[in-house]
Every structure is written in C-alpha cells, then in structure tokens.
Image (tube, rainbow, N blue to C red):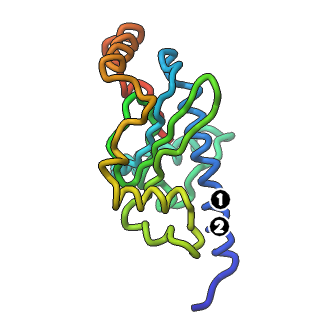
Amino acid sequence: MKIDRLETHDRLLQFKGQSDYISKGCQDCINNRPIQFDIPFYIFAHSRSVEMDERVSIWQHDLISEAIDPLYIRKYTRFDEIPSARLIWSPRLSKPVPQPNSMLFKAYPPTDNIKIIWMLPASELWDQYTKGLMLQNRDVVDSINQFNTNFSEMSLPESDDLPEERVSEIYENIRMVYGSGSGKNKFEMIH
C-alpha cells in the first residue's frame, strides 16, 4: 500500500489536536460549573449525532451569515465538513454508567487537577487504538480493557463520591437558585 505522507501528516496533526480539544472541554466544564460544585465532581463527555435537518440548518446559517456580514468568514466550504456528531460536556456529582463513545474525568476544585476515569471511543474504532498503531493510547486501551473485562467494577462509585442523599440536596439547591427548569442538564456544554 502506498502512503500519502501529506495526508498521513494531516491526520496526525488532527489527532494531536484532539487532546487540546479534550483539555478545553474539561476546562470549560470546570470554569462554568455551578457554584455548588466546590467538591470533587465528574466531567462526562458523550457524543450525540447531529441529524440531517440540523446539519442543513447549520449550512444555511453559515451561508446566510456570509451574505449579510462582509466580515464573516465561512466555517464550512463543503457540506461534508459539517460535523455529524457533537460532544456534550456535563458536570455531574454521580458517576454515570460507562458507555462507548464517552469520556469520564473527575475534577478536584479548587485546583485544576483532573483524573481520567475512562476514555472510550466508539466500539467500532477500538481496534485502531491497539499497540503499534498511530492512535495507540494507554488510557484508551486500559479503558477498553476495563469495559470488556470489569464492567461492574468500572461502574462502581469512586471512594470519594458523595452519598446519593447529599447529591440530591445539592441538585435541589441548584434548582432553587437557578429556577425550576434547571438541574443536572442546565450546565451541559456542547462543543
């Protein structure tokens, strides 16, 4: 097989840029968390698909913005450049159930320290993260192995998690402060 060095280099740069994207997502979650999250909390990132109607709307908005604003620079020159999935970042007090195509971190305020709990790509991509391949990553390989062999242990709360009663009290306080439509999902961030 003949390798196109420029294409391979571009893919490597894109892969390396993902770690910056993950760091930014975690930092945004820390910076924008509810004030009640002054204790260790989870940062859960999971992927959701962007349906065709929304992709068309994004394309039209980009096109119209360019037409009405001479300073606007188009984000998408081809329709296939519009993402077909988005990553949703949300701060949580309880550990979610492990699932493919998700990442879980734990933040420790007031510091910016973050612990990786798991990093699970979509299951159809798992073979691409094995040793010797460009996408090889120890955290991802360990997460996949844990998911396949110790799912029940992976799902257990961490030793420093709050009891569910205390978690409910904090979420109730958030609801009281931010209004009745608020709660766990009020602070989700979409990237």
Q: Secondary structure at mark 1?
A: helix
Q: Determine the CA span between mark 1 and mark 2.
A: 6 Å
Residue found at the far bottom of this picture: 1
Picture layout, residue 65 above or below residue 148? above
The answer to whether marks 1 and 2 mark residues whose Cβ atoms lie closer than 8 Å is yes
Name which residue lies at 62% across and 22% down.
110
Q: Quadrant of residue 97?
A: top left
Pointer 2 residue: 12
Q: Is residue 52 visible?
A: no
Q: Position of residue 23 (x, y in %)?
A: 61, 43
Pointer 1 residue: 16
Picture layout, residue 137 above or below residue 46? below
Name which residue lies at 64% across and 27% down.
111
Q: Position of residue 161 (x, y in %)?
A: 41, 28
Q: Give the residue type at disc 1.
A: Lys
Name which residue lies at 47% across and 62% down.
80
